[in-house]
Image (cartoon, rainbow, N blue to C red):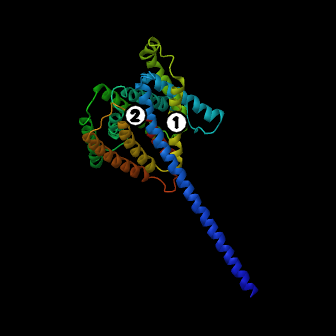
Amino acid sequence: MKERRRSKVLISDHHSRSDSMAADRSKGVVRDEFVTYAYILLYIALSSGQIFFNKWVLSSKEINFPYPLGLTLLHMIFSSVLCFILTKVLKIFKVEEGMTLEIYVTSVIPIGAMFAMTLWLGNTAYLYISVSFAQMLKAIMPVAVFVLGVAAGLEMMSCRMLLIMSIISFGVLVASYGELNINWIGVVYQMGGVVGEALRLIFMEILVKRKGIKLNPISLMYYVSPCSAVCLFLPWIFLEKSKMEGNGTWNFHFLVLTLNSLCTFALNLSVFLVISHTSALTIRVAGVVKDWVVVLVSALLFADTKLTVINLFGYAIAIAGVAAYNNHKLKKEASPRVTTETPGDDSESIALVSQANTER
């Protein structure tokens, strides 16, 4: 009888421990999911907010800072200094190894130059067109990336991809047709920014595939930001420095511009966090959600934004094409990979950092 009671007690203890472990695992899963969703919401909020913040700084009479080159240069200088402090002084993040002078000159400098061009032209477009229309024009990005990828030998033309590119292009054309106050100068600037970003992504793919360098977003910003700052400094001297001096705008709102630069860096950091806790599919879906948030919320925030049914219909078509493109790319990227690869893989990171960097 005693042995039977003892066995019952042991079985009861075993069940209670199992239940406790299962409860702990369940709490851990819930906690991880909560953290993941928090990071995704943080990314969407920062990415959307940064676009609105830049538009307000550039076009607001209160701030009086209509200098896209100067603003972008400030972002890159701020990013360079913070990256250095976080990686070399505080050592919170680690800079990936393997960078050589040859790779820096042949890959990082072109990436930095295209990054500077993208941000400069994209921010300049906000002086001429609405935030929502600029966002709609950005939907043409996969077409530019694919065309340049085919030219560089990184992509293969196929009937499926031709159909997807046609859908995206048609959607953007319809959205543009529905724009009430179209400004072609702004369209040219925005398209220039799209081409610059497409070239940047091509150079990044060459850096990963042909040179075997894998960089997380923090490492990428550590190497690219100083190069972009130099590329922006030269045209700033000739195009905006004299204007700023003539208008006496050296007495700018230091606190506002510092906060704006800090938000830009926080956006890049949020991409790092999202990549570490989710997958490529998750962040691309979050990017699509963010695009719609920007388009719809900008109509409430800015007087120059007037959405029409044709606008939204065309943009919906373009976004459907972008979703099909993302799905195609994810399947293509996943096919040669080993299934045990983690979501935060660095080769995935370098491709996804564009989710943040292009939203200026």
Residue 106 percent coordinates (x, y): 47, 30
Q: Answer above or below: position of 55 versus 334.
A: above
Eyeballing the image, is 247 above or below 131? above
Residue on which disc 1 sits: 220
Which quadrant does the C terminus fall into? top left
Residue at the image position 70 percent from the left and 77 percent from the top: 10
Q: Quadrant of residue 149?
A: top left
Identify the residue shown where x is 36% and y is 50%.
328
Is residue 214 in view? no
Q: Is residue 22 above or below residue 169?
A: below
Which residue is under mark 2? 197
Q: State left or right for residue 86 relative to residue 324.
A: right
Mark 2: secondary structure: helix
Report the front residue among 357 and 299: 299
Q: Is residue 338 above or below residue 196?
A: below
Q: Nearer the viewer, residue 306 or 324?
A: 306
Q: Is residue 169 left or right of residue 58?
A: left
Question: What x and y, as percent, mark residue 40?
Answer: 48, 47
Q: Earlier in the sequence, mark 1 or mark 2?
A: 2
